[in-house]
Image (cartoon, grey):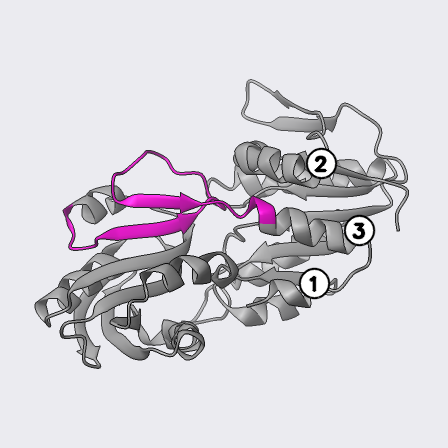
Amino acid sequence: MSAGIKIFSGRASQELATKVAKVYGVSLGDVKVTDFSDGEFQPSFEETVRGMDVFIIQSTMPPTDNLFELLLMIDAAKRASARKIIAVCPYFGFARQDRKDKPRVAIGAKLVANMLMAAGVDRIMTMDLHADQIQGFFEVPVDHLYGSTIFFPEIEKLNTGNLIMAAPDAGGAKRANSYAKRLNTGLAICHKQRKVANEVAEMTVIGDVEGKDVVLVDDMCDTAGTLTKAADLFMSKGAKSVRAFCTHAVLSGPAYERIEESNLTELIVTDTIPLKKQSSKIRVLSVADLFADVINKMVHNQSISSNFL
């Protein structure tokens, strides 16, 4: 057990970090960020962290200032003699750049991992990476939590014997299949083809959804193009209703408008990324209890296996 812990937050995750600290039973640490007229900024810890286990909560969604702010805070904690520095990234940005899918492109997820380690991080805690193999990009321990821990109880409430799990694309089939096995339901998959990024050209359904309450699961919802097209397609194939559970509410571009105008009954997301605006079709579940529990177990050197569903 450490001499003590302190929980801090970057500016991108203040609301979630405040909840996590409250559930854990401590006050959120005092961080001051000084902005300069040229756009540079400098975070500083306004209290001692010497000999402490420092947890820095910051999702690294765009803009890249969020990632760089986290890097600066890690460096500051290291130079202030923190005992251990744990970066808690509920949403790990650049995770979609996990491989070279065409010539002359960067592997952004690996670069981010290298930067975090170079800054001095001792451990990473994150949720629903876009690709599981990103854990292997790090030479420090990675605690990879799953949104299913939050979503399963909600989906079980919807299960009246008429439920079918669905994946919005072939890449999400493994995730949807794990839900289907646990809930003992059928599985449907949307096969999509893209001509350019963020734009779906064609979709077809694999599986029978007629008369079913369809539950789509995915790690993130970005422009909502795939989700809303899938929902419309399922309804055209005779589905009774379509709901979607997505861990990370990226929701960029026309996402909000698409969701409002779609056949989705509801989109359930977590607060790993704060919503830009409210929507009658979007419901948010907090991951604060889960992260606070894992932090507590980590501090007391307890197993976190029970947190994986």
Mark 2 vs mark 3, foreground winner is 2
Residue that appears at 53% across and 48% down: 287
**Helix, strand or loop at mark 3:** helix
Residue that appears at 88% across and 39% down: 81
Amino acid at the residue labelled 3:
Val
Is 251 situated above or below 109? above
Mark 2–mark 1 contact, CB under 8 Å? Answer: no
Callout 3 environment at 10 Å: few (<14), some (14 to 19), or many (20+)? some
Identify residue for label 3. 299
Mark 2–mark 3 contact, CB under 8 Å? Answer: no
User: Which residue range is magenta in the image?
Assistant: 261-289
Which quarter of the figure has residue 102?
Answer: bottom left
Disc ID at residue 25 = 2
Q: Earlier in the sequence, mark 3 or mark 1?
A: 3
Q: Which of the two residues, 161 or 80, is positioned nearer the viewer here? A: 161
Q: Position of residue 46 (x, y in %)?
A: 76, 23
Amino acid at the residue labelled 2:
Gly
Identify residue for label 1. 304
